[in-house]
Image (spheres, coloured by chain):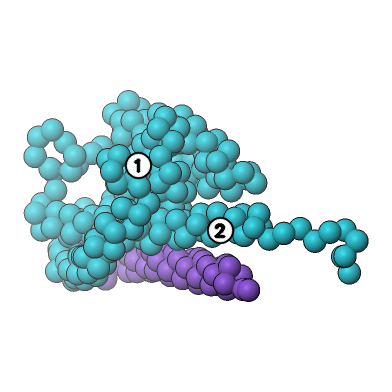
Chain colours: A cyan, B purple
């Protein structure tokens, strides 16, 4: 783990992984969308709206996965002060916010025909909305300070404190009476989903994961370039001799 | 397809958000790399000046 915290080593590794993750994203989305939209049957209760689940569930999983990574990056940045941890956290927060927003929007689009409402203040929905605010808060805090290190530190503390929301999201359907259904895939016994529906769900989940890897690499590279640029500009401003006051135009 | 408007809206929003984020990330990377290259080039020229 420590070995990959070196930006130069990360760049080499990312260069090798990027073409494969990009190809996997395209291939998995093509297969997943085919199964999700055309090959899988409608549900006997939900009808065609079950197809929304093939976008909604992977985006929910990825939102939580990205937040867990954000908290880990925050901890690594605070404790070991690894140069890459802060950059990675800054890079992945908007991806997590996008997955969370997508989860909430697609959930609403499923809820209207199935529950008869776009939104309820149910424990699962509310805790996922808080997750979106945590991501947005992280983005805002990271960019709120002139000193990037202070911004990253404040955002890392928020990410760590907000990690308490992850088990709340996961177990909200067990701890409280919610309109949202309980877990049907990540159960201790077998998944309660027919293989005809499990196939598109898992393919789309893998596609979302490959997409995350691809976009995270692009964004971390951009952050590394931005940091190099800042360092270079500071070095150049130090190198440039100051013009004596008397000679100024 | 019953409820087609909800299903296609969900996939439309997903496509818009995911493609939008991908394009924004690509554009951000290209911009930073171009600025870094220009700054690097400027620094090199300044160092080589007699």
- Where does the image place residue B12, in percent across and percent down from the top left? 38, 69
Q: Is residue A140 above or below residue A122?
A: below
Of A20 and A170, the residue lying toward us? A20
Quarter assignment of residue A245: bottom right
Q: Chain of mark 2?
A: A
Quarter assignment of residue A98: bottom left
Horizontal side of A177 relative to A35 (left or right) equals: right
Horizontal side of B46 relative to A42 (left or right) equals: right
Instruction: Please tell me which residue is depicted at 44% across the width and 52% down the height of the picture.
Output: A91
Helix, strand or loop status at disc 1: helix
Of A249 and A84, the residue lying toward us? A249
Number of numbered discs on residues:
2
Q: CA distance from mark 1 to mark 2?
A: 30 Å
- Where does the image place residue B34, in percent across and percent down from the top left? 50, 72
Instruction: Please tell me which residue is depicted at 47% across the width and 56% down the height of the picture.
Output: A223
Q: Quadrant of the N terminus of chain A?
A: top left
Q: Please, which residue is most extreme toward the front here?
A: B50
Horizontal side of A175 relative to A190 (left or right) equals: right
Q: Is residue B44 above or below residue A226?
A: below
Of A50 and A223, the residue lying toward us? A223
- Where does the image place residue B29, in percent across and percent down from the top left? 45, 66
Q: Which mark is residue A106?
A: none
- Same chain for the residues under marks 1 and 2 in the image: yes
Q: Chain of mark 1?
A: A
Which residue, given by chain and number where applicable, does mark 1 sit on?
Answer: A69
Of A120 and B29, the residue lying toward us? B29
Q: Is residue B25 above or below residue A166?
A: below
Which residue, given by chain and number where applicable, does mark 2 sit on?
Answer: A232
Instruction: Please tell me which residue is depicted at 47% across the width and 60% down the height of the picture.
Output: A225
Q: Please tell me how crowded label 2 is: few (under 14), some (14-19), or many (20+) other residues with Cα within 10 Å.
A: some
Q: Is residue A19 above or below residue A192?
A: below
């Amino acid at each position: 783990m420590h070995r990959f915290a070196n930006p130069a080593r990360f760049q080499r590794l990312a260069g090798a992984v990027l073409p494969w993750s990009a190809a996997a994203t395209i291939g998995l989305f093509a297969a997943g969308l085919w199964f999700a939209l055309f090959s899988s049957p409608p549900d006997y209760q939900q009808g065609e709206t079950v197809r929304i689940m093939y976008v909604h569930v992977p985006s929910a999983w990825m939102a939580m996965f990205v937040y867990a990574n954000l908290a880990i990056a925050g901890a690594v940045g605070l404790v070991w002060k690894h140069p890459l941890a802060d950059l990675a956290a800054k890079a992945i927060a908007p991806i997590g916010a996008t997955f969370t927003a997508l989860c909430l929007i697609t959930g609403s689009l499923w809820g209207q025909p199935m529950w008869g409402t776009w939104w309820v203040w149910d424990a699962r929905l509310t805790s996922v909305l808080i997750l979106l605010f945590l991501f947005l808060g992280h983005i805002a805090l990271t960019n709120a300070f002139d000193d990037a290190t202070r911004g990253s530190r404040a955002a890392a503390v928020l990410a760590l404190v907000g990690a308490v929301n992850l088990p709340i999201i996961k177990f909200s359907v067990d701890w409280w009476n919610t309109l949202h259904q309980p877990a049907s895939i990540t159960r201790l016994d077998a998944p309660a989903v027919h293989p005809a529906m499990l196939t598109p769900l898992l393919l789309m989940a893998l596609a979302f994961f490959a997409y995350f890897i691809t976009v995270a690499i692009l964004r971390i590279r951009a952050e590394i370039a931005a940091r190099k640029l800042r360092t270079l500009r500071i070095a150049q401003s130090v190198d440039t001799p100051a013009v004596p006051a008397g000679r100024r135009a | 397809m019953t409820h087609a408007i909800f299903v296609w809206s969900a996939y439309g929003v997903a496509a818009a958000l995911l493609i939008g984020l991908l394009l924004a990330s690509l554009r951000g990377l290209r911009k930073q790399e171009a600025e870094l290259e220009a700054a690097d080039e400027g620094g090199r020229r300044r160092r080589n000046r007699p």
